Image (cartoon, helix red, strand yellow):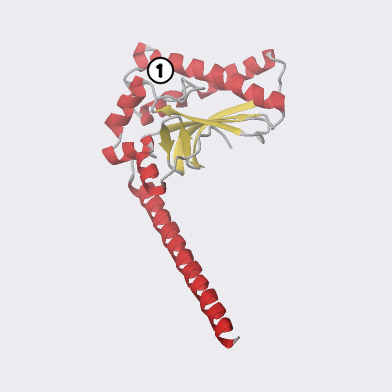
Amino acid sequence: MKEYNNKRIESAYGILLILRRACLLMAALFSALLLFQLYMEGHFRIYDHTLRFHVRAASDRKDDQELKLMVRDQQLELIHAKVLEDKNREMVGSAGGMEALLAGSLDGLSRQADQYMKKLGYDIGVNVYLTRERFPVRRYGSVIFPAGTYHALRIDLGQAKGHNWWCALYPELCYNNEEYILTKEGEEQMRQSMSDFERKILSGSFFRWITGRRLSESSGS
């Protein structure tokens, strides 16, 4: 009986050792990923060479979520028209230039969004503004944006308590809003403004190498 109990104790001790090593390995991996995240945010150009697009619905009611997508489409059409104007082509060749163009268009975009919603029977107010805000890691089709603080064009509908819709205006990604495919212009923008390593991060190849799996695709939270 004593020998049997000793074997049980040894077995339990062995399991505890395995669990301890697993916990230490997980802690080390978590620490490494945290340090890499801090390094990215401190050194990578992704955050200053990207302009995100963020639309927040008034609520999670079905009609408010549908309105969010309709306003999204209307605003993207207006923004894309500005991007395609010959006089703006040089300006929109960088994220900063794109942001500057939109900075002079905020009142017009807000007014047109408000008029559009009122035509649809919604008098809830809208706020269109430029900001810097933190985004979680997100995959859009073949493109991954790491977590961090980005420049963003944000549109708040009503009390803005509903789910988000996220994308990127620079590099060009939003204009295929259901497919999340970089345009040829967007691919060129990535090539010009980001290092090879950063492009690997955005393409997802680095994260797949680290985790061995694909990140889930999402455009909201």
Give left or right: position of 192 versus 212. Answer: left
Image spot of residue 106 (x, y percent) = 51, 24
Secondary structure under the numbered disc 1 in the rendered image: helix
Image spot of residue 207 (x, y percent) = 39, 44
Q: Which of the 4 image quadrants contains residue 151? A: top left
Image spot of residue 5 (x, y percent) = 58, 82
- Answer above or below: position of 77 versus 4: above
Q: Which quarter of the rendered picture does the C terminus lie within?
A: top right
- The answer to whether one can see residue 199 in this image is yes
Residue at 35 percent across and 43 percent down: it is 206
Give left or right: position of 178 versus 124. Answer: left
Pick the front one: 212 or 54: 212
Q: Which of the 4 image quadrants contains residue 62? A: top right
Give left or right: position of 60 versus 195. Answer: right
- The answer to whether one can see residue 108 in this image is no
Number of callouts in the render? 1
Pointer 1 residue: 83
Q: In the image, what residue type sits under mark 1? A: Val
Pick the front one: 4 or 91: 4
Q: Which quarter of the rendered picture does the N terminus lie within?
A: bottom right
Residue at 40 percent across and 52 percent down: it is 38
Image spot of residue 39 (x, y percent) = 36, 52
Residue at 61 percent across and 19 percent down: it is 70
Few, some or many residues within 10 Å of mark 1 (<14, 14–19, 20+): some
Pick the front one: 211 or 16: 16
